[in-house]
Image (tube, grey):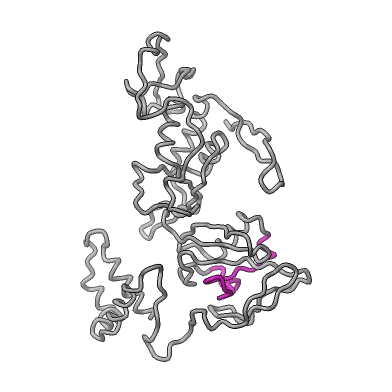
Amino acid sequence: SVPALAMVEMSADGEDPLLVPEAVSPAEEFSLLEPLLNEPLKAGSSYFLINQRWYVEWLQWVGAPSVQSPQMRPADPPLELDEIGESGWTLVDTPPTARRTRQRTGSWTKDRPGQIDNVPLLEENSSTAIKKTLDQLNDYRIISEGAWNLLFGWYGGGPPIKRRAITRPGGSVQVELFGLTLKALRSSEMTMPPYEVVESKSTTIGELKANLCSEMNVDASKVRIWDYFERKPFALLEGHLDDTLESKRIMDLNFILLEEPLADGSWPLNDSNDDQSQPEPAAMSSGYPSYPTTSSDITSVGEPIQRGVVGLQNLGNTCFMNSSLQCLSNVPQLREYFLDGTYKETLNRTAHKTEGKLAESFADLLEMM
């Protein structure tokens, strides 16, 4: 069954009132969530991370069988439900005196949990990037969008940590946790903080545009999407909607601009070139900022003066690694060994963790260089 929806106060932007599920009993919460928690992953669907500690407290509150033990009794009052879902488990009601003799432990609350608290999962000063040291068994649980919407409607809190499921090369489906963190801006609101999203490298430009427009309440047919590298108009991406973020060299912490037309219908930015170029921005008015007319400090792209004479963009503090890669790429015998595909004959697919992927990635990099 679907829970009833109740009108609550106006949303933060003053538009339509928010709809949240009405409060229900602990047993009803679990009966509504259980089928959503057991759904298989579906490529392209959205999923949310939730703090494992909070999630276990919620399981204890609703009396889920997975957390019941002599030390972890059901929440008070006991659930008035004999069977939930198809799991076949039964709650046996005990006399009130017997329940009172069972002591609560100090480790976990058996009361209704407070607001969802996902802050411990996030990197400092980020609302989207999660810590690299997280462990799925101990730190977080992945739940479907439907399950998140119910829990968030009942308990509030957050912040939401949204990810998408992707299909791996072998055909398996998994939720990509550490994608590209992108910072999106609207050209009419350049002074506002950027909207952060995390996307897979395999996401297409068109999918990114649709996702951003949906999240930022923008009509996709009335904006253009730009690679706004280092907060400068770097490349118009409208002609590459079927290309992936990786193929267009969109990097972690890259800025993305949704360009909105001016009052007269014209576009603020010059679109004379739209393929990894540095378009000269037009002057703006009516609240739009003006951009410098020079792009000399923007990383240049295009054909190198000779094969292999190219630089590598630093990703944070990768300058030492880039220097090593440049040295390796200029060892003729090693370079040709990878470029002509000879390395594939000795590729070690049984290598611990990498399974030969490191060698393949190095070969791909040499090909691009």
Vertical placement of 307 versus 139: above or below?
A: below
- Hey, which quadrant is residue 358 in on the image? bottom left
Percent x, y of residue 64:
41, 27
86 and 194: which is toward the camera: 194
Percent x, y of residue 155:
54, 35
Q: Which residue extends farthest bottom? A: 305
Is 234 within the magenta? yes
Vertical placement of 23 versus 193: above or below?
A: above
Residue for point 39% across, 77% down: 312
Quarter of the image with the N terminus is: top right
Vertical placement of 132 versus 68: above or below?
A: below
Is 92 within the magenta? no
Percent x, y of residue 332:
26, 86
Residue for point 28% across, 70% down: 359
The total of numbered circles placed on residues is: 0
Please provide the residue range marked out in magenta. 219-242
Task: Say whether residue 88 is left or right of residue 285.
Answer: left
64 and 161: which is toward the camera: 161
Residue for point 69% across, 67% down: 260
158 and 349: which is toward the camera: 158
Quarter of the image with the C terminus is: bottom left
Task: Say whether residue 256 is left or right of residue 97.
Answer: right
Percent x, y of residue 225:
60, 68
